[in-house]
């Protein structure tokens, strides 16, 4: 199973919150003793998905030493979300990371950065960020969903790694030459396990009547015939064990609708 996460969803939530915060600040009663850096154009351009204007507008806020810390964080988050939507993942991670350096209590940003790490295929860092978000906010729904999905994915990968290179039978009891050949070759061992699993799935489907056009006994008989032919023909001139196993797997997957 390929795991995917709604990166645009997290970015949209962050941008919406930032715009609301900016609007509240603009109507506030506090009078600044020092001229404030205007963050409005940055947030507006980011929310409008306007890369051309968001770049310079947000840079003017982020690169200005006089920018107040809250505005710096907002600008970094806004630009990071925009960059993420435009598949500039590394730059988005950099902005989120800088925002977290300024304020390491931002659960939303940890979750958003975790989704970006996941997009890059870095599962350990993704899990770490989702966990950090939950440590800050145990009720963060998106982080909980992401962390749970990642835990399942890592469990699945671990299970696959545990059986990688192992056939469907115990190599210690292998007696036939073909079985020993399968045990000695990781690719053949994986193929054997996949053939066994695909056949079991097809038989199970037939028995459950979800595929009434298939007879479970006929399917198992075909598998038994394949094993018998494999055992008899292995080692003979022209017999390609790998191709025979691949053909059988393709046949089974076709039967099962995969």
Image (cartoon, rainbow, N blue to C red):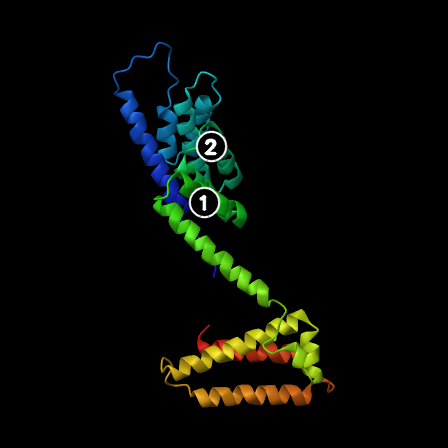
Give the number of the mark in front: 1 or 2.
Answer: 1
In the image, is residue 216 above or below residue 164? below
| Mark 2: secondary structure | helix
**Mark 1 or 2, nearer chain start:** 2
**Image coords of residue 182 (percent x, y):** 67, 77
Task: Measure how far apart labels 1 and 2 are at the Cα level.
Answer: 15 Å
Q: Would residue 178 be found to the left or right of residue 39 on screen?
A: right
Outermost residue, top direction? 33
Q: Is mark 1 on a helix, strand or loop?
A: helix
Image coords of residue 246 (percent x, y): 59, 76
Q: Position of residue 85 (x, y in %)?
A: 43, 41
Closer to the camera, 28 or 92? 28
Residue 125 at least partly seen: yes
Q: Do the residues labelled 1 and 2 touch (CB within 8 Å)?
A: no
User: Is residue 250 placed above or below 59 in the rendered structure?
Assistant: below
The residue lying toward the viewer, choosing from 99 and 134, is: 134
Above or below, 82 against 175 in this view is above
Residue 91 percent location from the top left of the image: 52, 36
Residue with the mark numbered 1: 131
Disc number at residue 81? none
Residue at screen point 66% across, 81% down: 173
* Residue under the point 32% across and 26% down: 22
Can see residue 240? no
The residue beneath circle 2 is: 100
**Residue density around tag 2, few if under 14, some if 14–19, many if 20 or more, within 10 Å:** some
Quarter of the view holding residue 194: bottom right
Residue drawn at 46 percent across, 77 percent down: 201
User: Left or right: where does residue 34 sit relative to residue 83?
Assistant: left
Residue lying at 70% horizontally and 78% vertically, measured from the top left: 181
Which class describes the residues within 10 Å of circle 1: few (<14), some (14-19), or many (20+)? Answer: many
């Amino acid at each position: 199973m390929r795991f995917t996460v709604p990166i645009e969803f997290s970015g949209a939530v962050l941008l919406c919150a930032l715009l609301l915060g900016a609007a509240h600040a603009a109507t506030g009663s506090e009078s600044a003793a020092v001229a404030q850096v205007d963050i409005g154009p940055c947030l507006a351009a980011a929310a409008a998905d306007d890369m051309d204007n968001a770049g310079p507008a947000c840079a003017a806020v982020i690169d200005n030493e006089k920018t107040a810390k809250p505005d710096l964080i907002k600008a970094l988050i806004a630009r990071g979300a925009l960059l993420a939507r435009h598949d500039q993942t590394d730059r988005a991670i950099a902005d989120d990371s800088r925002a977290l350096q300024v304020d390491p209590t931002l659960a939303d940003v940890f979750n958003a950065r975790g989704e970006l790490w996941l997009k890059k295929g870095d599962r350990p860092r993704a899990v770490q960020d989702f966990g950090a978000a939950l440590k800050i906010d145990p009720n963060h729904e998106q982080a909980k969903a992401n962390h749970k999905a990642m835990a399942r994915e890592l469990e699945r990968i671990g299970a696959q790694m545990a059986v990688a290179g192992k056939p469907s039978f115990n190599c210690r009891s292998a007696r036939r030459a073909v079985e020993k050949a399968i045990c000695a070759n990781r690719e053949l061992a994986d193929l054997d396990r996949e053939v066994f699993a695909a056949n079991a799935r097809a038989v199970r489907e037939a028995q459950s009547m979800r595929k009434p056009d298939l007879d479970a006994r006929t399917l198992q008989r075909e598998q038994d015939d394949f094993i018998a032919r494999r055992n008899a023909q292995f080692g003979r001139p022209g017999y390609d064990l790998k191709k025979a196993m691949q053909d059988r797997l393709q046949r089974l997957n076709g039967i099962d609708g995969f």
